[in-house]
Image (cartoon, rainbow, N blue to C red):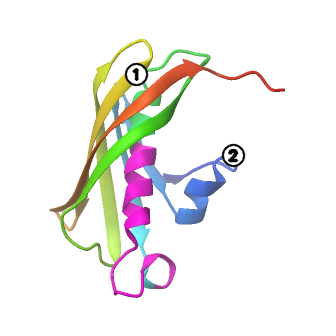
Amino acid sequence: MRPFSQDFQFARALGLQMVERGDGRCTMAIDIERERHFNPNGVAHGGVAYSLADTTMGGALMSLLGEGLVCATLEIKFNYHVGVREGPLTCEATVLHQGKRIANIDARLFQDGRLVGSANGNFAIFPIPSAQ
């Protein structure tokens, strides 16, 4: 696993790590820490799992995009199946369909071999905006 570069501070702040990416698939992970990621109810905050899924889904799509193209989340439907505890949390995402402007991506989150969350989202595809 490898941490994200300095240009992706949000992923670095959460502790997301790239496992592998290519051919419309991406796997990322995070080591859930009680002091860093838990809410007052004794489980990881749902935003941590959602952010992992969103970033992994974007990574899967970016592995297919040509030079000069980027993507952005349009919408994600996320299902929380069980509470996330301390320890490794892994997300696996796959591009299900890619059109010229929109892609649909599926993600599954696992902890200790157990499905803890799932997501499906639509992402916009567009040229890199020019700096103004």
Mark 2 element type: loop
Q: Look at mark 2 in the image and give the residue it sits on.
A: 7
Which comes sooner in the sequence, label 1 or label 2?
Answer: 2
The residue that appears at 42% across and 83% down in the rendered structure is 34
Whole-percent x, y for residue 72 in the image: 51, 34
The residue that appears at 69% across and 50% down in the rendered structure is 6
Question: Height in image: 112 above or below 107?
Answer: below
Whole-percent x, y for residue 22 in the image: 38, 29
Question: In this image, 66 relative to 47: left or right?
Answer: right
Label 1 Cα neighbours within 10 Å, binned few <14 / some 14-19 / many ≥20? some
Give residue 90's quadrant in the image.
Answer: bottom left
Whole-percent x, y for residue 61 in the image: 41, 29
**Residue situated furthest top in the rendering:** 100
Mark 1 element type: strand
Q: Is residue 37 magenta?
A: yes
Question: Height in image: 101 above or below 116?
Answer: above
The residue that appears at 45% across and 16% down in the rendered structure is 101
Looking at the rendered structure, the number of numbered marks drawn on it comes to: 2
Whole-percent x, y for residue 62 in the image: 47, 29
Going by the numbered disc 1, the residue's amino acid type is: Ile
**Residue situated furthest left in the rendering:** 114
Question: In this image, 5 relative to 79: left or right?
Answer: right
Taken as a whole, is the magenta stretch helix, strand or loop? helix
Going by the numbered disc 2, the residue's amino acid type is: Asp
Question: Height in image: 29 above or below 101?
Answer: below
- Disc number at residue 73? none
Q: Which residues are magenta?
A: 35-56
The quarter of the picture where the C terminus appears is: top right
Discs 1, 2 touching: Cβ within 8 Å: no
Q: Look at mark 1 in the image and give the residue it sits on.
A: 102
For the residue pair 73 and 31, the one nearer the viewer reads as 73
